[in-house]
Image (cartoon, rainbow, N blue to C red):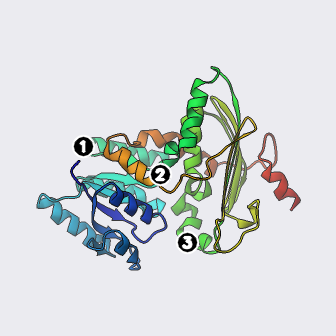
Amino acid sequence: MTAKSFALIGACGYIAPRHLQAIRDTGNTLVAALDRSDSAGVLDSYFPDARFFTEFERFDRHLEKLRRKGEGVHYVSICSPNYLHDAHVRFALRIGADAICEKPLVINPWNAVALGELEKESGRRIHTIMQLRLHPAIRRLKEQVEQGPPGKIYDVEVTYITARGQWYLVSWKGDESKSGGIAANIGIHFFDMLAWIFGTVKTNTVHLYEPQRAAGYLELERARVRWFLSVNRNDLPFEWVPGKAATFRSIRVDGGEVEFSGGFTDLHTESYRKILAGEGFGWQEVMPSLEMVYTIRHSQPTGCKGDYHPMLIRLKTD
């Protein structure tokens, strides 16, 4: 396969190294990168010859110049803050490139529909990163559900706690208008996975919704789901030690644990392989999860009523 050329937006952010590694490991080249921060030393480990820009206008001009010379990039990888994804996807399509966009694709579902119209007009593609669909344990779970008794309704419990410090709420991630809130920012992969495996939403109830925590109940076609998300380290089921892993993931189905604690490091590379082979996930496929988190963000929390996650009992007694 002929090597493809990439540009990347958001080179100095948390998730960018996974994209840089994926570009390198799939045998492709990064031509240009953009970030308003100039702490871009990470590029030395992957593509030290890539042109680097701190101003979008100069980045835009450089890539447009390449396009007019017949040397335009094939893909633009988007690792920018969530509220900028919409604009950066449109930029990719405008310069004749496919977009590879980190989660969530957009904050509001109707923005994805508008991007779909632009995709059709441009003839290019919008690819989304929903790597949980590629995790071996999650794929096995989907197969088990598909091969299980028709009409069976599963009882599912999802817990995701990933500790973040005080910086989190000060950054764009703590600004709901820019991140989409906790459900969109850290939960979107899980909601996508749930819809992918268990079908469309019938009921979406929110019990708790705070800047650092959220919890609720979903009734899907094939599952009843209690979910809990948190970036508060006090919610971890183990004592937090500086320098050690500070993430807890759990999916329980009918009382049994789905073991998927490992296997996350290469999922971006696998996502890129799928995209390059024409097997990536398009904007239409992430609409159910975008609609879920939009509803969660705009719901009035009910408190501990009905079928709620057991973590809420702990929070009530602390």
Circle 1: residue type: Gly
Please determine whether, in this image, residue 275 is positioned above or below residue 101.
above
Answer with mark 1 or mark 3, whichever residue precedes in sequence.
1
* Residue bearing mark 1: 123
Q: Quadrant of residue 182?
A: bottom right
- Residue 141's x, y, as percent? 60, 36
Circle 2: residue type: Leu
- Which of discs 3 and 2 lies nearer the camera? The answer is 2
- Which of discs 2 and 1 lies nearer the camera? The answer is 2
Seen at 82% across and 44% down, the residue is 305
Answer with mark 3 or mark 2, whichever residue precedes in sequence.
3
- Residue 7's x, y, as percent? 29, 62
Horizontally, residue 126 falls left or right of residue 64, namely right
Instruction: Name the foreground residue: 67 vs 26.
Output: 26
Q: Which SS class for mark 3?
A: loop
Residue 171: assigned label:
3
* Residue bearing mark 2: 267
Circle 3: residue type: Ser
